[in-house]
């Protein structure tokens, strides 16, 4: 199985890896039997934050995240790619999973998504609705207000809106 890039949406704000650590992290995550769902990095002059999302068939639990965190902590300590103090978090994408790349959008077609935009598209900076279609340049989301064609390069952040079941006692 070949390793595919997580951030395949060009010019998208979410596709930042300012610390350049994806190439270090991904082989370790894959070798442990997980998929690197996504990576969020925020780096400043004084500190940095790294969130690694892992997934696999059947999902992941806290113990999985702890194992991966332990391995990645050791790797990052040895390789030392981050020049400032940083916090590392390993997490499941969860029910409201972030959508990082074209493949993620294709997987959730027909489901509800929340999309935040870097600039207004069709007079909106936020769109919530059903993801109707996906192509190389745009997604189409149908909301109560109509159909919104959104260029990938305008997407700041996108999440699946998970379905939760309320249990009455």
Image (cartoon, rainbow, N blue to C red):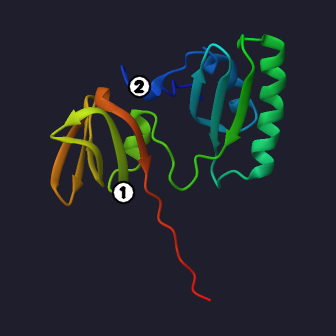
Relative height, residue 96 to residue 69 (above, below): below
Residue displayed at 16% across by 56% down: 145
The front one of 144 and 133 is 144
Crowdedness of circle 2 by 10 Å Cα count: few (<14), some, many (20+)? Answer: some
Relative height, residue 78 to residue 90 (above, below): above
Left or right: 18, with 76 as reference point: left
Visible in this render: residue 2? no
Left or right: 103, with 25 as reference point: left
Inter-mark Cα distance, 2 to 1: 23 Å
2 or 1: mark nearer the eye: 2
Tell me residue 59's x, y (percent).
65, 53
Q: Do the residues under discs 2 and 1 have CB atoms within 8 angstroms? A: no
The front one of 158 and 68 is 158
Name the secondary structure under disc 2: helix
Q: Which residue is mark 2?
A: 13
Left or right: 10, with 91 as reference point: left
Left or right: 7, with 80 as reference point: left
Q: Which residue is mark 1?
A: 111
Visible in this render: residue 114? yes
Q: Earlier in the sequence, mark 2 or mark 1?
A: 2
Q: Residue furthest bottom?
A: 169
The picture quadrant where one finds residue 36 is top right
Residue displayed at 37% across by 43% down: 106
């Amino acid at each position: 199985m070949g390793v595919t890039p997580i951030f395949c949406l060009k010019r998208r704000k979410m596709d930042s890896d300012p610390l350049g650590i994806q190439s270090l992290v991904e082989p370790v995550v894959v070798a442990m039997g997980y998929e690197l769902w996504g990576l969020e990095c925020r780096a400043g002059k004084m500190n940095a934050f790294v969130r690694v999302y892992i997934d696999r068939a059947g999902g992941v639990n806290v113990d999985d995240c702890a194992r991966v965190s332990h391995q990645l902590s050791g790797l990052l300590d040895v390789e030392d790619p981050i020049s400032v103090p940083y916090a590392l978090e390993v997490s499941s994408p969860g029910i409201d999973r972030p959508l990082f790349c074209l493949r993620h959008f294709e997987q959730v077609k027909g489901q509800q998504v929340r999309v935040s935009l870097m600039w207004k598209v069709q007079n909106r900076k936020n769109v919530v609705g059903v993801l109707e279609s996906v192509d190389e340049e745009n997604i189409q989301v149908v909301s109560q207000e109509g159909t919104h064609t959104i260029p990938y390069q305008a997407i700041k952040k996108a999440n699946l809106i998970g379905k939760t079941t309320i249990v009455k006692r």
